[in-house]
């Protein structure tokens, strides 16, 4: 197993491996878990003897204000005190939502995350971002609230469908583009029981931790972690969240690669196209630039003077910058050519 440490002032460990030890809670526990990973949840329940146990179905349909309110009221009815801990067991929607519950109840409880999907391991559970969606867009409500610890129990990945396993590794591939790490750009042989999975995931998480440590509240460099996400979030919203996040990001990475090429950078489209094929991503929602413009305008990287785009000029050379509309439209026209002819 591997341990990575997030530096102060938001210091906490990130464990990645099989058969991880269960930590000793420092107060009463509210265990929030996805029923798809009930065996892991039951093991944690036996060890921590939580005061409150709540099932929460994974998926974007749960990541909304009505469910957020329901969970808060459950904690209130159980009389959870200020020294309680929230333990979140599930994929990214569960850790995002449960972490936001922890950030909000009594103005902030400690929490711990057990990510059980590849997407949650390499991205959602790491970095302290929590939140929910609005009908107007993804992750528009939330808080920065780092966990007390992250425990990536890789045995939980064994039950993932192959498509979901691969889809989640899109975020690791994205970390490879940001860091210029060729090892992360080649997930093609990985599977839940592959001996290289643990070092691969550890390498991907280390990239994110390094960026987060330098810019926790996303005022600058951390925006690079949104590579591919501006269009991806628009595609998710336009599809009614029917397009999985990893698949949406893969399509967003293709647009980012085309934008980088349009602005004079290297042509990174070939590895991204291979990623789309490997993940078996479905075709994105149809529409022109103007059909997605309202969703894009609500992106979290938007500032008073306009939207910032994450542009890859080469692997390891990624910039956050304003981009003129003609370049955006040219890249989108090229992207549409791939999307409309895509066999998926």
Image (cartoon, rainbow, N blue to C red):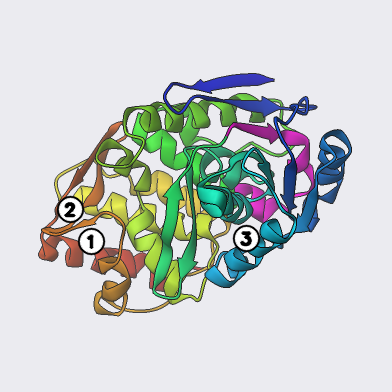
Residue 287 left/right relative to 44: left
Q: Residues within 10 Å of mark 2 (few under 14, many from 20)?
A: some
Query: For residue 266, which quarter of the picture?
Result: top left
Report the Cα–Cα distance between label 2 and label 3.
Answer: 47 Å
The structure residue drawn at horizontal position 11% and vertical position 65%, both measured from the top left corner, is 326
Instruction: Give the camera-side residue of 92 and 147.
Output: 147
Residue for badge 3: 72
Magenta highlight on residue 160? yes
Quadrant showing the C terminus: bottom right
Q: Which mark is residue 262?
A: 2
Query: Quick one: which residue is furthest to the right in this view?
Result: 46
Query: For residue 229, which quarter of the picture?
Result: bottom left
| Picture coordinates of residue 116, whole percent (x, y) | 69, 44
Q: Residues within 10 Å of mark 3 (few under 14, many from 20)?
A: some
Q: Is residue 128 above or below residue 279?
A: above
The structure residue drawn at horizontal position 78% and vertical position 25%, both measured from the top left corner, is 21
Q: Earlier in the sequence, mark 2 or mark 3?
A: 3
Residue for badge 1: 331
Instruction: Give the camera-side residue of 232 and 98.
Output: 98
Residue 47 left/right relative to 65: right
Answer whether residue 278 is visible to the viewer in this image.
Answer: no
Q: Residues within 10 Å of mark 1 (few under 14, many from 20)?
A: many
Q: Earlier in the sequence, mark 1 or mark 2?
A: 2
Report the Cα–Cα distance between label 1 and label 3.
Answer: 43 Å
Query: What residue range appears in magenta?
Result: 148-166
Q: Earlier in the sequence, mark 1 or mark 3?
A: 3
The structure residue drawn at horizontal position 40% and vertical position 61%, both measured from the top left corner, is 232
Q: Nearer the viewer, mark 1 or mark 3?
A: 3
Magenta highlight on residue 149? yes
């Amino acid at each position: 197993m591997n341990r990575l440490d997030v530096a102060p002032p938001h210091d906490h460990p990130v464990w990645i491996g099989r058969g991880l030890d269960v930590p000793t809670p420092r107060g009463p526990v509210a265990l929030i878990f996805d029923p798809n990973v009930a065996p892991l949840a039951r093991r944690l329940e036996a060890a921590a003897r939580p005061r409150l146990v709540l099932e929460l179905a994974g998926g974007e349909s749960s990541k909304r204000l009505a469910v957020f309110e329901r969970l808060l009221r459950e904690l209130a009815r159980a009389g959870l005190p200020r020294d309680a801990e929230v333990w979140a067991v599930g994929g990214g929607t569960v850790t995002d939502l449960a972490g936001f519950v922890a950030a909000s109840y009594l103005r902030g409880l400690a929490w711990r995350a057990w990510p059980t999907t590849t997407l949650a391991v390499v991205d959602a559970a790491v970095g302290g971002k929590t939140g929910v969606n609005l009908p107007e867009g993804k992750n528009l409500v939330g808080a920065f609230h780092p966990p007390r610890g992250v425990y990536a129990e890789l045995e939980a990945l064994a039950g993932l469908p192959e498509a979901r396993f691969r889809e989640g590794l899109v975020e690791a591939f994205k970390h490879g583009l940001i860091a210029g790490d060729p090892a992360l750009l080649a997930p093609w042989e990985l599977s839940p029981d592959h001996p290289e999975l643990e070092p691969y995931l550890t390498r991907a998480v280390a990239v994110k931790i390094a960026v987060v440590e330098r810019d926790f509240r996303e005022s600058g460099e951390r925006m690079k972690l949104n590579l591919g996400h501006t269009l991806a979030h628009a595609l998710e919203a336009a599809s009614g969240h029917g397009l999985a996040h990893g698949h949406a990001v893969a399509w967003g990475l293709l647009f980012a690669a085309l934008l980088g090429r349009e602005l004079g950078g290297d042509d990174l489209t070939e590895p991204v196209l291979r990623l789309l094929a490997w993940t078996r991503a479905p075709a994105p929602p149809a529409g022109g630039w103007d059909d997605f413009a309202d969703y894009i305008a609500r992106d979290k990287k938007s500032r008073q003077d306009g939207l910032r785009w994450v542009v890859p000029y080469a692997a390891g050379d990624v910039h956050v910058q304003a981009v003129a509309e003609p370049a955006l439209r040219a890249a989108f026209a090229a992207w549409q050519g791939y999307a409309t002819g895509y066999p998926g």
